[in-house]
Image (spheres, rainbow, N blue to C red):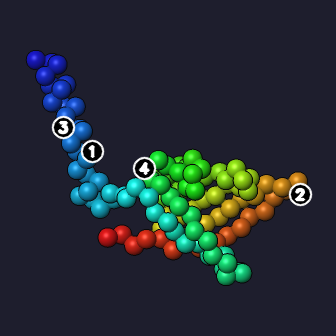
Amino acid sequence: MLPNRALVAGFACAIAGLVVPTITGHAQQSAAAITCTNPASGASWQIRIDYGKATVDAFPAKISRTEISWFDREEQGNYTLDRKSGDLTATIASSTGGYFRRSRCELEKPQ
């Protein structure tokens, strides 16, 4: 009897895990290209977020409900994107102590 209960409970949890994100509207597409802009210079560029692979521009990323963070090996910078405001902060290390760069990204509107 106990193995059957465990099996039924396991199936129930699996189904709930698939249904709840859809009901709450937090289902996420697999990838998105987002445009970011430097407010001082007006320069803009795109970052590509792959939610399924948990990467940003092919770099491993930590993706939570509130932010996305990653390390860019090419620029040697740590990036943090606030998923609510679109604020992007880059922390760049250097021999003189490092510096911050702040930008704003146009996040996709929830559908």
Q: Is tag 1's residue or tag 3's residue first in the polypeptide sequence?
A: 3
Check residue 17 in the rendering and tell me which mark sits there, or answer none. 1
From the image, tell me which residue sits under label 2. Answer: 96
Image location of residue 103, percent across then percent down: 64, 72
Q: CA distance from mark 2 to mark 3?
A: 55 Å
Secondary structure state at the residue bearing disc 4: loop
Q: Residues within 10 Å of mark 1 (few under 14, many from 20)?
A: few
Asked whether the viewer can see residue 85, the reply is: no
Q: Is tag 2's residue or tag 3's residue first in the polypeptide sequence?
A: 3
Q: Is residue 78 left or right of residue 61?
A: right
Secondary structure state at the residue bearing disc 1: helix
Which is more toward the observer, 98 or 29?
29
Q: CA distance from mark 1 to mark 4?
A: 16 Å
Check residue 52 in the rendering and tell me which mark sits there, or answer none. 4
Check residue 12 in the rendering and tell me which mark sits there, or answer none. 3
Compared with 95, 5 (above or below) is above
Q: Is residue 92 left or right of residue 18?
A: right
